[in-house]
Amino acid sequence: MTPNTSTAAHLQRSLRQCLATAAELLYHHGHVLESITLHHRGIGRRELAAISKQAPEWATCQKVLINSEAAIYNEYGCFVLTSMGRELMFDMFGEGAADCA
């Protein structure tokens, strides 16, 4: 395995771990996956701060997702997954998790 392949594999593993953690934390805080998989929805900054306060691991995952371009803030200022993030979520949790229709 070349260094680039190793780095890519590690990044994808980190992304998947963060997506799984995000899904779990969203559920525990009363949200559904569509909260972040639908571009026009998202999680607002106030709610993100509340989740981070109660679950410090959220902030780390949020940074990983944004830095890897798997998540962004939409035009409403809400945290949502990009098409890549939705694709990974779909791969991990099935069609309903990343259904954008």
Image (tube, rainbow, N blue to C red):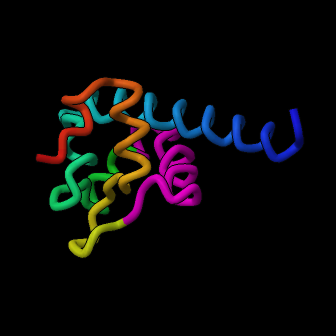
- The picture quadrant where one finds residue 10 is top right
Q: Residue at x 77, y 43 (%)?
A: 7
Q: Is residue 67 above or below residue 7?
A: below
> In the displayed structure, does residue 3 sit left or right of residue 84?
right
Out of 67 and 94, give the one closest to the viewer: 94
* First to last magenta residue range: 52-72
Q: Is residue 37 above or below residue 26?
A: below
State the image coordinates of residue 55 (x, y, percent, origin top left). Answer: 44, 36
Give the farthest residue toward the right.
2
Question: Which residue, as the protein is rendered here, is positioned at the far left?
Answer: 101
Residue at 43 percent across and 37 percent down: it is 88
Classify 93 as above or below 39. above
Would you say the magenta stretch is mainly helix, strand or loop? helix
Residue 51 spot, x, y in % from top left: 35, 44
Q: Is residue 76 magenta?
A: no
Residue visible at 39% across and 38% down? 54
Quadrant in which the N terminus appears: top right
